[in-house]
Amino acid sequence: MSKGRDRTVSPRSDGKWDNKRNDANRASSVHNTQREAQNAARANLKNQGGGELTTQGRNGQFRDKDTVSPGNDPKSIKG
């Protein structure tokens, strides 16, 4: 189950990328590349005490999920 502080990186219709908290209506930040949005989301999560980062691809499907420490990852493998 997603917590409010968890974040999702997703594409916008203008070709840019959103970094958004899962409980927010608006993006926290907008970036030119997916990598920039992921880095910003990781920094936000680290400052908030950790959580899950989910990345959505241009096709709308979720392509990656990562636990940012000090979040609680129940699996011992990376990813």
Image (cartoon, rainbow, N blue to C red):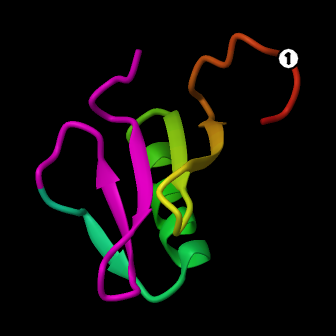
Q: Residue furthest top?
A: 74
Q: Residue furthest left?
A: 25
| Residue 17 at x, y percent in the picture | 41, 75
Q: Is residue 79 above or below residue 36?
A: above
Q: Nearer the viewer, residue 68 or 47?
A: 68
Picture residue at 29% right of the left edge, 46% below the top: 21
- Kind of element beneath mark 1: loop
Look at mark 1 in the image and give the residue it sits on: 76
Q: Is residue 36 above or below residue 18?
A: below
Q: Is residue 66 above or below residue 75?
A: below
Q: Main secondary structure of the magenta part?
A: loop
> The N terminus is located in which quarter?
top left
Specify whether 23 is left or right of 7: left
| Residue 41 at x, y percent in the picture | 46, 57
Identify residue type, mark 1: Ser
Q: Which residues are magenta?
A: 1-25
Picture residue at 65% right of the left edge, 39% below the top: 66
Specify whether 23 is left or right of 32: left
Picture residue at 16% right of the left edge, 46% below the top: 24
Q: Nearer the viewer, residue 42 or 61?
A: 61
| Residue 46 at x, y percent in the picture | 51, 45
Badge 1: residue crowd in 10 Å (few <14, some 14–19, many ≥20): few
